[in-house]
Amino acid sequence: MDLPTKTILVVGTYDTKDDELSYLAGVIRAQGGTVLTMDVSVLGNPQAATDITKHQVAEAAGSSIAKAIAAEDENVAMQVMARGSALLASRLHRDGRFDGVIVLGGSMGTDLALDLCAALPLGVPKYVVSTVSFSAMIPPERLAPDLQMILWAGGLYGLNSVCKASLSQAAGAVLGAARAVEPPRRDKPLIGMTSFGKTVLRYMVALKPALEVRGFEVAVFHATGMGGRAFESLAAEGAFAAVLDFAPQEVGNHLFGSAITAGPDRMTAAGRRGIPQLVSLGCCDLVDLVGWHPLPARFAHHPAHAHNRLLSSVVLNGEERRELARTMSDRLGEATGETVLLLPRHGDNEWDRDGGPLADPEAYAAFLEELQATCPAHVRQIALDAHINDAAFTDAALAVVDDWIARGLLTA
């Protein structure tokens, strides 16, 4: 079977990583792909000409290599190249010049790679081969929703058999992804929903098929940091016709210092875009923490639940929940479109039902009270005599969606 010809954009500092980048390109060509090369060097020059030169990259950022060098600061210089490479990559992709991208680098190259990949739409294969892949120094808010990272083991300086194992896999991965990818379709309006697994939140089991019957596609995002980041990124692009943000727990994670964060702008993108949003409180009584990290001192006396070896949750007290409620109200206040807040009075996750292992009715009542008191006037509140996992919650959510459809705010 003949495989489709795909072009991969290969990006890196060709003055110092020419051998490694050429090796990547060679593997891609040997597998039947074609290559477009982009040099993001500043000081030196590649051994052979690249398709996009460092001068073109700097000029795309409204600068020049001479100015970047004159700054006498490698961070300033590489940020020029990051801006230019992101703008050029976006333009080249719109023009159909490449089908996937692979960027090679250490911490400098990775910093640039994050900007470049974030400039490309969902569905474009994006691979970063980095000496700092998966490092805690990489903030989740800078990761493109479908970014792939491969650790560049043993690759800090020069080619060897160890790093070739990583580079060859990465080359095959990006080319294979470009051949196999099925980009998101736009034939149905997309609704974005946030949730957790069915153990703790269950509304999506009934809501997804019900919304599909109404003519929508539904994407459910796992709100454990990276899922929320992807959700916000797509909302910012205007990818959603509406959002059902029923598990905005990452707002609390960030507020209280958890490493499991979707960044400081969680629960803002849909509102700023004017996208109709239906918001609720799934797991907002909990802060998720990295399970293998020591418990922060401030939570030493809080009830806790070990979900698995990766993830633990602590239960917020009443004052902490009031603080979270005020923060959520501030985020809702930024919304420019239709916004509805569903308030299930009997709990926001399966573990906090009456008599449940993490139930704290007084703290939950304080949370609801503060939300109702501080919620912006333009946000419609619907209080429900139900738990978030009850059928009554699902029915109420569908009633709001049906009202939006009837009023022409949402069209299937």
Image (cartoon, rainbow, N blue to C red):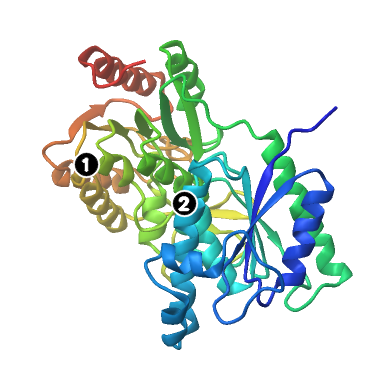
Secondary structure under the numbered disc 2 in the rendered image: loop
| Quadrant where the N terminus is found in the figure | top right
Check disc 1: other Cα within 10 Å, few if <14, some if 14-19, many if 20+. Answer: many
Query: In the drawing, does residue 70 fall left or right of residue 40?
Result: left
Q: Residue 15's spot in the image, x, y percent?
A: 65, 76
Q: Residue at x 79, y 73 (%)?
A: 154
Query: In the drawing, does residue 143 fall left or right of residue 265?
Result: right
Q: Earlier in the sequence, mark 2 or mark 1?
A: 2
Q: Nearer the viewer, residue 124 or 71?
A: 71
Q: Which residue is mark 2?
A: 119
Identify the amino acid type marked 2.
Ala
Query: In the drawing, does residue 353 fall left or right of residue 361?
Result: right
Q: Residue at x 43, y 74 (%)?
A: 64
Rendered view: 66 above or below 219:
below
Q: Residue 208's spot in the image, x, y percent?
A: 48, 21
Check disc 2: other Cα within 10 Å, few if <14, some if 14-19, many if 20+. Answer: some
Secondary structure under the numbered disc 1 in the rendered image: loop
| Quadrant where the C terminus is found in the figure | top left
Rendered view: 107 above or below 378:
below
Query: In the drawing, does residue 210 fall left or right of residue 173?
Result: left
Residue 32 marker: none
Q: Which residue is mark 1?
A: 335
Rendered view: 300 above or below 368:
below
The reply to whether residue 296 is visible in this rendering is no
The reply to whether residue 187 is visible in this rendering is yes
